[in-house]
Image (spheres, grey):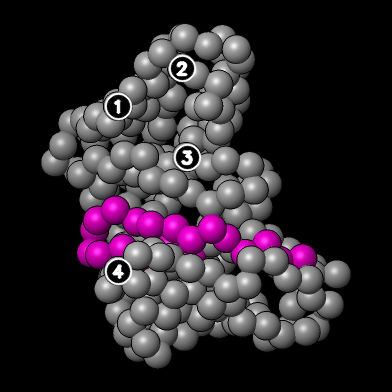
Amino acid sequence: NAGVTQTPKFRVLKTGQSMTLLCAQDMNHEYMYWYRQDPGMGLRLIHYSVGEGTTAKGEVPDGYNVSRLKKQNFLLGLESAAPSQTSVYFCASSFFRTEAFFGQGTRLTVV
Amino acid sequence: KQEVTQIPAALSVPEGENLVLNCSFTDSAIYNLQWFRQDPGKGLTSLLLIQSSQREQTSGRLNASLDKSSGRSTLYIAASQPGDSATYLCAALTSTNQAGTALIFGKGTTLSVSS
């Protein structure tokens, strides 16, 4: 049972490049989330999904897009990366109003 | 808008001490409250989950309490050990603006336990 797996674990992008972060969970959870963690700011919600085919904006959605075509996967896209998107990104999943489980994070640097 | 605050931001104690970490939240309409541990450069590990109808949860040397009416939760660590050194995060499960729910996090308390 792998839990929540994030791919890749590290990435360096140049300003303006695009990339997709993949989150996969094997617990059949309905809810999935993307957060970013920055020093002094804590974890902030980017986007979330309450089920396959649904997505919604969180606190800091600008510059990101998401898709949930399959229940087990939640993709976070950066269309044109900016240095302000340098951060550690965490994916999480849960059943409705229950314990949330987090992935190990993706450390992204935009130069 | 839900805001979660953790006090203190950092705490240093000698091994063996009992300690309390504090978490407060502004909107009492939460579904649950979850405590996490984060080691440097690592992900979040769930420690305890307290449902909104519960008052406390215990796991080993950890005890978490919840008082929804006052908007407070505490994490009690008994007989602290150097291996407890980490950042502890609390998060309140709250309704979002778009008919969903999401965890709102405090900024954490960084604990250092010296031997």
Residue placed most toward the observer, A53 or A62: A53
Please report contact status of discs 1 and 4: CB closer than 8 Å, yes or no.
Answer: no
Q: Chain of mark 2?
A: B
**Residue A106, image x and y in percent?**
62, 64
Circle 2 residue: B80
Circle 1 residue: B60
**Residue A20, image x and y in percent?**
61, 82
The disc, 2 or 3, on the residue closer to the chain's N-terminal end is 3
Badge 1 and badge 3 both on one subunit:
yes
**Residue B42, image x and y in percent?**
58, 49
In the image, what residue occupies the spot 28% across and 31% down?
B59
Position of A104 with respect to A73 (left or right) is: right
What number is the disc on residue B7? none
Q: CA distance from mark 1 to mark 4?
A: 26 Å
Mark toward the viewer: 4 or 3: 4
Q: CA distance from mark 2 to mark 1?
A: 12 Å
Q: Chain of mark 4?
A: A
Q: Is residue B107 visible?
A: no
Q: CA distance from mark 4 to mark 3?
A: 21 Å
Q: CA distance from mark 2 to mark 3?
A: 14 Å
The disc, 2 or 1, on the residue closer to the chain's N-terminal end is 1
In the image, what residue occupies the spot 49% across and 35% down?
B88
Q: In this picture, is A72 found above or below B44?
A: below
Circle 4 residue: A27
